[in-house]
Each structure stands twice: as C-alpha cells, then as structure tokens.
Image (spheres, rainbow, N blue to C red):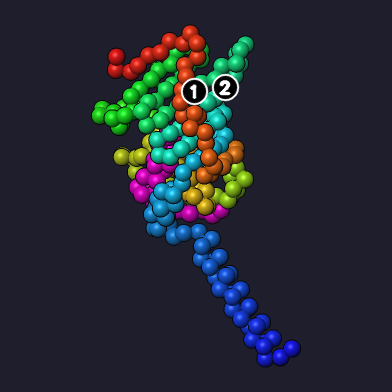
Amino acid sequence: MDRKWIVGTVAGLAVLAAAALAVLFFTSRPPNADRLPEEAAARLEELQTIKGRLLLGKDDQALEYELWVQRPRHLRAETELKGLDRKAVFILMFNDEEAWTYDPLLNIATVTDRSKGPPADGSRFGTSLLETMPDDVLAGLRAADIQIIGEEEVAGRNALRVQLLLPPTQNPLAEVGQDVTVWLDRSVYYPLAIEGDSGFRLRFEFIRFNEAIDPVTFVFFPPPGATVRRTGE
C-alpha cells in the first residue's frame, strides 16, 4: 500500500477527529451567564412534551406528583393523598378550553374557563405553578444576578446548576424566594429541580421529554357522584 496514501489518510482522520472534538467542546460546555436566558428560551421553545414524577412542597413537607405536559397549555398532574383509609387522588387537568381541579376529600370538581386566556384580575384561577414553572424560571433568569455553579445529575439527566439572586420586587419566583437555585436540563433547559430560601422545594425523580402523550390524558371526566362547580357562577 502506498506510504503517502496511508500518511495522508491518517492525517485526514486526525483532522476530522479534532474537528469533532471541537464541536463537542463548544456545544457541551456551559453557556456564558449573560447568554443563558436567551439560550434557555430557544431550547424551551422547541420542547413539546414532558412526562415525569416529582416531589413538590415546602421545607420538609412534600407531595409526589405524576405529571404530563403537552406544551404550551395542556397539563395533567395527580397526587395520591396519604394517610387515608381509601385511595384518594387529587387531580389538576388543563387544556386550551378548561381547567379542572378535583378534590377527592370533598368529592368536588371545580372547572374554570381558559378559552379567553388568563384572568384579567391577575388571579391564578385556571392555572398552576406546575404549568407556569418553566416560564417563571425563564423570567427569573432574565431578572436575576446569575452564577453558573457547574453540572450535576438530577433524575438521571445532566443538569446545569444555576444560582439566582432575585430582586425583592417584581420577582417572578416570589413563591420560591430571592436566593434561588435551579437545575436546568442540559439538553432542553427545562427545570429539573428548584430550591429557594422560602423553603420551597421541587425535584423530579424521573422525567422524559418529547414522548407522545395520549390526548385523552387532557380530558377530565368527573367521578360519578362528584359535585361540579364552575368558577364565576
């Protein structure tokens, strides 16, 4: 075999390997803190579905939720209430038209019209922190002093750990606190965990992105005998 051909081939492969490593380095390294909000916004814009299980609560009190999301306005979340002599599942279910909340202890299903957009009075009727969380975190990234701490594993995925120091007024994460830590999925920038100085805690135990979800998931059927109440009536 021609020696020059062998040397040329090896050199060519070395150049390709170096180029591939350079691309990997520049696409996997943590983003600059100044650019993080815009990069997160671009990645979140491409996100379609989320399936997962998470712990949500304050201080040492937390509930475990199963979560299904079809962005931007479809969500279902369920948590089983413990310590009862029967199975009781609290349900949140949102779609473009309606928001349902089912309280199994009272056997009451409350429905809110969502077809006209958010309430004009700024109330949270017809929405939930679980729905607004990614947008709230994104707004927090834009409003806060940001420090990128590094990368850690959350729910089996690589996450970017970011420290946020938020303003005392007009804080989009006021419920979480002013000194907030978020763990953003390194691929899609969806929040995998959030902790704040208010005691707020949210952490996914497992999560999957962009998997198909049955549309029936986002249709609510009140249990037989449940009282149905419509807000505003």
Asked whether 172 or 221 is in front, the reply is 221
Q: Nearer the viewer, residue 211 or 159?
A: 211
| Span colored in magenta | 128-152
Q: Position of residue 52 (x, y in %)?
A: 56, 36
**Lower sequence index among marks 1 and 2:** 2
Instruction: Determine the secondary structure under disc 2.
Output: strand
Quickly name the residue at label 1: 91
Q: Which quadrant of the figure contains the C terminus?
A: top left
The residue to which callout 2 is attached is: 80
Q: Is residue 194 above or below residue 5?
A: above
Magenta highlight: main SS: helix
Rendered residue at 60%/16% (across/down)? 87
Q: Is residue 108 above or below residue 171?
A: above
Task: Say what secondary structure mark 1 lies in.
Answer: strand
In the picture, measured across the screen, residue 198 lies left or right of residue 3, that is left
Residue 45 visible to the viewer: yes
Of the two numbered discs 1 and 2 in the rendering, the one whose residue sits closer to the viewer:
1
